[in-house]
Amino acid sequence: MPAIYLADRVLMRAAGSQAGHFLHGVVTCNVVDLAQGQARYGAMLQPQGKIIADFLLYRENEESFLLDAPAEVAENLLKRLTLLRLRAQLTLERLDDLAVAALFGTQAMPEGAVAYADPRLEALGQRLVMPCAAAEGLEQDVALYEAHRISLGIPRGGVDFAYGDAFPHEVDMDQIGGVDFDKGCYVGQEVVSRMEHRSTPRNRIVQALFPREAVAGGEILAGEKVAGRITSAAGRQAIATVRLDRTGDAQAKGVPLLVDGVEIELQRPAWAHFDMTWTRKESPLDTVQKAGG
């Protein structure tokens, strides 16, 4: 499979003596222990815990980091980071002379590219950072990469979930290393921590298998109830956002899940470990509340 130019991605650089410390304090992933040449998956959240932008974070050297973000949210992400910077010793800039490509399979590395292993899943391959002129000479059929991503069940922001309308748990960020629950405070941390320890998300992103060509956009019906929606599709495989309480209840009762009258099968991605049925978590705080404390 050739390297594929991802023209819908934008690179930004945070550089300076306090760049790592600053990023660590505002995004969901751990930045300070990220080694040079390695990558992390993370997000910038609203104070209410919903995702403003998700991105891949690459450490170039001791004082320089690259953020590989969707073009549709890059400007907002850069603006948010700039507002939070205050007096921190770092610079933030968009890099319009560099581009991002994806490399998976057995294709040789393009000349002049710097590679970072995709931190979400080994099977996704590598992300390449290279000059725009070189990237424009690569394969540009993004559908090839999309089919690969969908086959692995990896969500894509702006397609499988809407920015500003989803919590990290709802889009499986907690399953693919997008949230560090031990790092301490960051914007939105309190809400995310509460979801981790006091509840089980009703909404999750899962894989959907069709008996025919899958099409994105269709509602998943469990009887007369809407249980989810197909968000990405390639061949007979798709990604769906679902209400686990409704899909789990339907499957327990033998009620088929239908999309446009066609029965589908839902499955948890191979890399995920959440329960496909919904139950509320119990925590020590529940015991206190039940006792009237």
Image (spheres, rainbow, N blue to C red):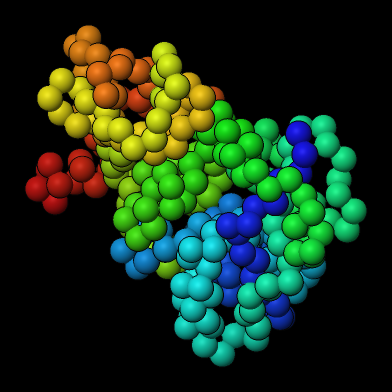
Viewer-side residue, 123 vs 191: 123
Which residue is pictured at 42% across the width and 25% down the height?
214
Q: Where does residue 155 sit, x and y in percent of width and height?
A: 48, 41
Res. 174 visible in picture = no
Which residue is pictured at 48% across the width and 65% down the height?
73
Q: Where does residue 219 sit, x and y in percent of width and height?
A: 26, 32
Viewer-side residue, 4 vs 41: 4
Which residue is pictured at 88% across the width and 58% down the height?
112
Res. 262 visible in picture = yes
Assign the N terminus to one quadrant of the image. Answer: top right
Viewer-side residue, 176 vs 31: 176
Viewer-side residue, 225 vs 139: 139
Q: Which residue sits furthest bottom? A: 87
User: Image check: 140 left or right of 201?
Assistant: right
Residue 96 occupies quadrant: bottom right
Which residue is pictured at 39% across the width and 35% down the height?
216
Q: Where does residue 193 sit, x and y in percent of width and height?
A: 38, 53
Q: Which residue sits furthest right? A: 111
Report the number of discs: 0
Residue 249 occupies quadrant: top left
User: Image check: 66 left or right of 206?
Assistant: right
Please, is residue 246 above or below residue 186 in the view?
A: above
Q: Where does residue 244 sit, x and y in percent of width and height?
A: 28, 30
Q: Which residue sits furthest left? A: 292
User: Image check: 166 left or right of 64?
Assistant: left
